[in-house]
Amino acid sequence: MVCPAPGRAPGWRTGYRAAVAVVIAIDAGTSGVRALAVDEEGQVVTTSYRELRQYFPAPGLVEHDAAEIWSLVETTLAELQSELAERSLTTATIGIANQRETAVAWDRSTGRPCHRAIVWQDRRTAARCVELAEAGHLPLVRDRTGLVLDPYFSGTKWSWMLEAGGVERGGSLALGTVDDWIGWNLTGGAESGVHVTDPSNASRTLCYDIGQRAWSAELCDVLRVPIEALGEILPSAHRYGTVAAGVAGGSLEGVPVSGIVGDQQAALFGHGCHLPGDTKVTYGTGSFVLMNLGAQRPPPIEGLLTTVAWDLGEHAPKGAADGFNYALEGSIFSSGATIQWLRDGLGLIGEAAEAGPLASQIPSNDGVYLVPAFAGLGSPWWDAEARGTIVGISRGHGRAHFARAAVEAMAYQCRDVVEAMTRAAGQSLIQLHADGGASAMNLLLQIQADQCGVPVTRPRTTEVTAVGAAMLAGLAEGVWSSLEELRALATNADVFEPEPRRSRADADHAAWRTALARSRGWARTSAQTANP
């Protein structure tokens, strides 16, 4: 039995919970919802997962059912709680990580969604973003938000819902991201739910001023988003409320909800990347590279995004001016989605896990390169009109070449972002922390190390996103007392050292860049050809 340490959360001090307590993390991602329990050593104790249905109303459109997201949260929490009860484990607090830019609209008086959630991958507002840029709003957006005018972000999605989507403006309308939607339901929904988000999520909306650290009335006016419908912004490590009666069977009633953070920032935190220059890549549906910048906000950097890493609020390290951290981000739209395409679109593999072994059957790509610009290109190119391209194929190429080209494309895209970041930050990368589903592939991490020329580390658990959310919640409730304590828990299981001779890696990357150039602007070029 582990005795509670002095000053820990109320859940640790009460007699009936003085056994062993865990922190629950809810990770509401693009492809599914996961609830997991993390112990005091930062280890995952147990987990529950459900896949989330994807809706594709038309090419380029991607939606989720917000009611289903909440239903899956309740299902996974109930399963998790059942397992924890069997082990006599209690819950100290709950943290939430989420898919960030996905836009949700709901009616606070009824608790019902007003429209399907519009997913971050959705491109329906591309023309609107072009209109805003042509009207001269891009400099304002870059200066205030650190972002670019791209349909990736929430603001134009909310605007579309209110205009073309038929969502009615009014006093009971709530606009938010998935973290806000989950937190609102956890804390009571239409009866008592709190409508809140944190700066890491707010900074992905186009409506948040990262310098003033507040919603921007000027940006909301430009985007035609009612600022009064947005949630309150509170620190990432903060007690927002407690779980309401009846949620997930009622066994979590009264447990504090004390951490909210975007999934990529959660992974950065979970890796222990708390210091300026620390960098991680998460290979998920897309890939996301984040470099911690500390408290200093840089000017807008071409090809990259400036985002909020987290706000520790009153839990900032001793001696720090505050706990507000910025990060540079490179957002790559298609990584795991490319493997899904090999499986679902081409039928080359039966399961995603087959991609790595199939790619490993051949020692090189034999000149085949894939640019997975299925939804355009993100960082550092930001080309919404790029399209997927495969070059170099001949009759002698087969399934293994396509699989290897897909795996290599993840590493090439990450290298492009890392090189842009190190140039912008004026410092070399020492190592790269990797997580996400595809980080289980040894081949990918070795190629990544060779391409970036630095060691690539893989942690003990690939669930770093959820662990990061749990750590923030636990920090808020005294489960962990400091960043130093948390960094000591973030140990690596594997380190992939780069090949010292760079000539092969550099040649492959140069060929990749040639293929990438072929994909740029393809949607515009093909449209002009079809309609001369």
Image (cartoon, rainbow, N blue to C red):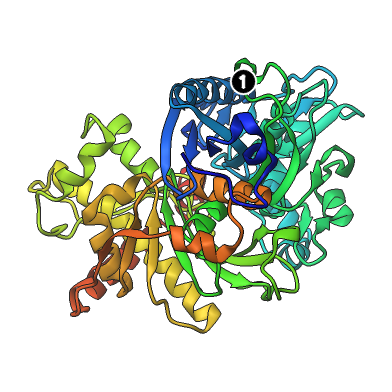
Q: Residue 109: horizontal and vertical position, in percent?
A: 85, 20
- What is the count of numbered marks? 1
Q: Residue 139: horizontal and vertical position, in percent?
A: 75, 67
Please identify the quarter of the rendering in which residue 299 is found. bottom right
Is any part of residue 10 visible from this angle? Answer: yes
User: Which residue is depicted at the point 48% across and 50% down?
Assistant: 376
Tell me: residue 249, above or below residue 314: above
User: Which residue is depicted at the point 10% across and 58% down?
Assistant: 363
Tell me: residue 23, above or below residue 435: above
User: Which residue is depicted at the point 22% across and 42% down?
Assistant: 355
Tell me: residue 226, above or below residue 242: below
Q: Which residue is mark 1?
A: 251
Q: Residue 133: horizontal and vertical position, in percent?
A: 72, 59
Is any part of residue 303 visible from this angle? Answer: no
Please identify the quarter of the rendering in which residue 194 is found. top right
Q: Residue 118: horizontal and vertical position, in percent?
A: 63, 34
The three-letter code of the residue at mark 1 reads Ser
**Viewer-proximal residue among 8 and 211:** 8
- As drawn, is 275 to the left or to the right of 103? left
**Viewer-proximal residue among 474 and 351:** 474
**Viewer-proximal residue among 142 and 289:** 289
Furthest-right residue in this view: 171
**Viewer-proximal residue among 44 and 454:** 44
The local crowd at label 1, few if under 14, some if 14 to 19, many if 20 or more residues have their Cα within 10 Å, is some
Q: Considering the numbered disc 1 on the image, is that residue within a helix, a strand or a loop?
A: loop
- As drawn, is 208 to the left or to the right of 169? left
Furthest-left residue in this view: 396
